Each structure stands twice: as structure tokens, then as C-alpha cells.
């Protein structure tokens, strides 16, 4: 009989600490982890953050990595970066995250990431738009 009150208390304790996943924080962690993979030249890890639509365009990690290295140099190896404004829409199904980047060459860039929630509830990077030498004007 004593086990029931203890179990009930444990359930209440765990229920009170569970909170809804924050899509913006999840998106920022995803972006940070992918940039970390790029900085460590880890094509496998970097590719794992790509959404299925991106993987359809670049069906293997090496092709994807080469594309990012060539077309998205500020994201591939940023000198410094910080998160700017963000917007979650459709109850967090899509997150737009601004990333302010200073390249290794000292030039400033703004990258707008689109992060999408997948059917399994995970989030993946669905696209990145890079704008040269801009200031934060919101999304």
C-alpha cells in the first residue's frame, strides 16, 4: 500500500518537470550542431541535419558537403556567428531563424534558416538563404 503514494508522488514530480518542446530553441541547437559539424569537416553529421527535400537534391553526404563548401562558405566555416530574430509558425511546424555571421574574411552575412518539423516530430534544416553585408531587419 505504501508503494502507491510513492509512485503517485513520482508521477506528479516528473509531470511537473515536463514542458513542451520549444521549437525556436530546438532550431538554434540544430543550427549550432550543424555549424559545429562543418567546422570539424564532419560530412556525415552535417548531412544528418538536412531535411528530406535537401537530401533528395543532394543524395549523398559528399555532394551535399561540397555544395555547402562552395556556395555557403560563411555557414561552412564562419569566423563568428550569433542568433538574431526568429519566428515559429503553424504551432512550431516551421521555424525561421536569422543567424548573423562574420566570415573568416571579416565580411558580414545574414543567413535565414528554415527549419521544419518532420512527421516523427524531429526538426531538420529545410533551406538556408544567405544575404551579404546586411543588418537585422527581422523575418
Image (spheres, rainbow, N blue to C red):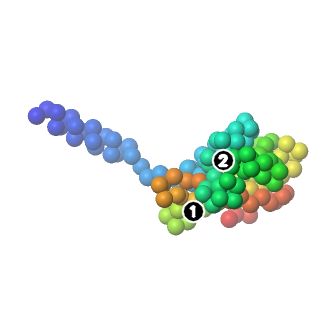
Q: Quadrant of the C terminus?
A: bottom right
Residue that extends furthest to the left in the rendered view of this protein: 1
As rendered, which of 87 and 41 lies closer to the eye? 41
Which residue has dot 2 on it? 47
Q: Taking 6 as reference, is 127 above or below it?
A: below
What's the distance in space between the residues labelled 1 and 2, CA to CA? 19 Å
Who's the residue at 27% across and 42% down the image? Answer: 11
As rendered, which of 62 and 75 lies closer to the eye? 62
* Circle 1: element type: strand
Residue 15 seen in the current view: yes
Residue that extends furthest to the front in the rendered view of this protein: 59
Count of all numbered marks drawn on residues in the image: 2
Who's the residue at 85% across and 57% down the image? Answer: 133
Local packing at callout 2 (Cα closer than 10 Å; few below 14, some 14-19, many 20+) is many
Q: Position of residue 118 (x, y in %)?
A: 52, 58
> Counting residues from the N terminus, which is met first, the one under dot 1 or under dot 2?
2
Q: Position of residue 69 (x, y in %)?
A: 80, 47
Who's the residue at 87% across and 50% down the image? Answer: 107
Which residue has dot 1 on it? 94
Local packing at callout 1 (Cα closer than 10 Å; few below 14, some 14-19, many 20+) is many
Residue that extends furthest to the bottom in the rendered view of this protein: 90
Residue 101 seen in the current view: no
Q: Taking 54 as reference, is 14 above or below it?
A: above
Q: Which quadrant of the structure image shows residue 24?
A: bottom right
* Residue 113: image tag: none
Task: Kindly report which numbered mark, 1 or 2, lies closer to the viewer in this rendering.
Answer: 2
* Circle 2: element type: helix
Amino acid at each position: 500500500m505504501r508503494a502507491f503514494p510513492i509512485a503517485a508522488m513520482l508521477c506528479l514530480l516528473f509531470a511537473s518537470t515536463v514542458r513542451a518542446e520549444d521549437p525556436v530553441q530546438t532550431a538554434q541547437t540544430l543550427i549550432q550542431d550543424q555549424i559545429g559539424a562543418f567546422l570539424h569537416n564532419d560530412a556525415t553529421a552535417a548531412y544528418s541535419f538536412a531535411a528530406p527535400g535537401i537530401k533528395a537534391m543532394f543524395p549523398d553526404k559528399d555532394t551535399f558537403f561540397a555544395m555547402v563548401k562552395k556556395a555557403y562558405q560563411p555557414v561552412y566555416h564562419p569566423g563568428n556567428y550569433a542568433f538574431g530574430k526568429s519566428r515559429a509558425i503553424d504551432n512550431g511546424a516551421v521555424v525561421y531563424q536569422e543567424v548573423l555571421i562574420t566570415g573568416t574574411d571579416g565580411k558580414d552575412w545574414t543567413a535565414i534558416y528554415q527549419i521544419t518539423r518532420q512527421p516523427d516530430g524531429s526538426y531538420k534544416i529545410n533551406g538556408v538563404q544567405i544575404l551579404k553585408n546586411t543588418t537585422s531587419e527581422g523575418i
